[in-house]
Structure formats: structure tokens, C-alpha cells
């Protein structure tokens, strides 16, 4: 996807700088890497989002940590926050199972699947789901926590290098396409001059 596509939907740096809510945070939220779309900033934002998407809790918790890490590492903040959405109610269970398996392998525990631990959300209100999920994660113990950290590191580093490589390949493709158009235009101009 090109930078032009994203620029249509994202606010300009000047618009962000003048925003009164951003101004409350002073210079911290005005660094250009937080809002510009370039290879390092977007790849970093993607890596931060992949890492913080595995922080136990609901989306506001993950959004907060994604924004905090994006500011700390000066990477694209909107990309970081949006990327956390890969962990959602539909994907969290397979992600936790994978994390548990990784953690069990690394810590030397048994890897026969996750132990039976009750996660009863139906009898709880939505506001009680976050604490219930955290209690469930803690009850699974060391293999899950170690696995989540390792999976978060693996996903974020893989995502970072994949975005950088994809960006580079897309740039090469665009350069070649432009060079081909220029050659064709030059050939047409030469044919027109000789005719």
C-alpha cells in the first residue's frame, strides 16, 4: 500500500501539533516519527503493536501500553495502537494455547495442551471479564507467562523485519515501474521525433 493511501485517512503533522488534546502532553506527542509514515516508523509501530497486543487485559489496556511504547521508542503511534487488535476475543484462545506450548517447551513442563482450568465468563458482567481473564492466566502459571513473553518477542521482531522487507520490496517495485514508464515515454518521444 502506498503512502498516499494512508495520507488520505491520517491527519497531517501540523493538524496534530495544533490539536488541543495533544498540546496537553507537550512535546512528547509531537515527535514526527509518531505520525509520519516511513519504513522505520511504521515497522517499529507494527512491532510495538504486536508486542503489546499480548499484554493481558482488554483493548484499552493494550492501547495504553502501545501508545506508551510508541512514544518511548518514537515509532508510529496509530499503527502501534491499531496493530494490537490482532488479539481479540476470536484469536486470544489460540494465541494463549500457542504461548502455553512455547512456555512449556522452554521451561521443561509437559506440553500435552493447556491444563483444565475453568474460565467462567457467562455468569460475570463484562466489567468482571478483565479480572477473571487475568486470574485465569495467572492460574496457568509459569509456562504461559514465559510463553507469552517469548511469543510477544518473536511476533514483534518477525513483524518488524517483515514490514521493513515488504516496504523495501514495494519501493523497488515502484521504482522499476516508474523506470519502465519513463523508458516507454522516451521511446514514444523518439518514435515521434523520427516520424
Image: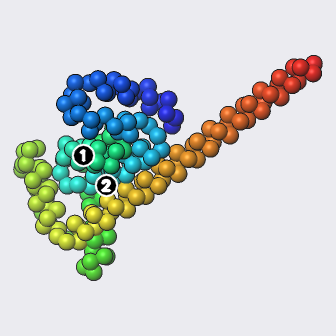
**What x and y, as percent, mark residue 97?**
28, 64
Q: Nearer the viewer, residue 140 or 5?
A: 5
Among the 4 quarters of the image, the one containing residue 94: bottom left
Q: Residue at x 58, y 42 (%)?
A: 171
Would you identify the image quadrant in which residue 24 lies? top left
Mark 2: few/some/many CA within 10 Å (<14, 14-19, 20+) = many
Q: Residue at x 37, y 28 (%)?
A: 13
Of the two numbered discs 2 and 1 on the same chain, state the one appearing first in sequence: 2
Is 68 placed left or right of 129 in the picture? right
Q: Residues within 10 Å of mark 1 (few under 14, many from 20)?
A: some
Q: Label 2: which residue?
A: 51
- Number of numbered markers: 2
For residue 18, above or below residue 75? above
- Give the residue at mark 1: 68
Judge whether residue 194 can be spotted in this image: yes
Mark in the foreground, 2 or 1? 1
Picture coordinates of residue 23, whole percent (x, y): 23, 29
Looking at the image, residue 152 sits to the left or right of residue 166; the answer is: left
| Mark 1, secondary structure of its residue | helix
Left or right: 135, with 194 as reference point: left
- Residue plotted at (80% across, 28% down): 186
Badge number at residue 143? none
Question: Between marks 2 and 1, how big is the CA–CA gap?
Answer: 12 Å
Q: Residue 96: percent from the left, percent from the top? A: 26, 61
Residue 40 position in % (x across, y down): 45, 46
Residue toward you, 55 or 33:
33
Q: Is residue 156 above or below residue 144?
A: above
Q: What SS does tag 2 mark? A: helix
Residue furthest to the bottom in view is 108
Looking at the image, residue 192 lies above or below residue 118: above
Q: Note whether residue 85 is visible.
A: no
Q: Residue furthest front?
A: 27
Amino acid at each position: 500500500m502506498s503512502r498516499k493511501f494512508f495520507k488520505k485517512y491520517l491527519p497531517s503533522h501540523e493538524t496534530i501539533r495544533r490539536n488541543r488534546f495533544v498540546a496537553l502532553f507537550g512535546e512528547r506527542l509531537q515527535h514526527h516519527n509518531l505520525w509520519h509514515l516511513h519504513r522505520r516508523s511504521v515497522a517499529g509501530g507494527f512491532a510495538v503493536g504486536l508486542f503489546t497486543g499480548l499484554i493481558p487485559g482488554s483493548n484499552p489496556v493494550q492501547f495504553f501500553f502501545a501508545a506508551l511504547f510508541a512514544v518511548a521508542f518514537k515509532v508510529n503511534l496509530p499503527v502501534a495502537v491499531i496493530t494490537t487488535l490482532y488479539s481479540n476475543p476470536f484469536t486470544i484462545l489460540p494465541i494463549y494455547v500457542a504461548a502455553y506450548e512455547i512456555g512449556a517447551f522452554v521451561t521443561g513442563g509437559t506440553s500435552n495442551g493447556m491444563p483444565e482450568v475453568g474460565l467462567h465468563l457467562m455468569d460475570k458482567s463484562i466489567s468482571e471479564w478483565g479480572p477473571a481473564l487475568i486470574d485465569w492466566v495467572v492460574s496457568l502459571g509459569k509456562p504461559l507467562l514465559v510463553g507469552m513473553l517469548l511469543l510477544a518477542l518473536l511476533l514483534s521482531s518477525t513483524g518488524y523485519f517483515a514490514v521493513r522487507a515488504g516496504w523495501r520490496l514495494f519501493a523497488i517495485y515502484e521504482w522499476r515501474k516508474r523506470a519502465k514508464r519513463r523508458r516507454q515515454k522516451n521511446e514514444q518521444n523518439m518514435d515521434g521525433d523520427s516520424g
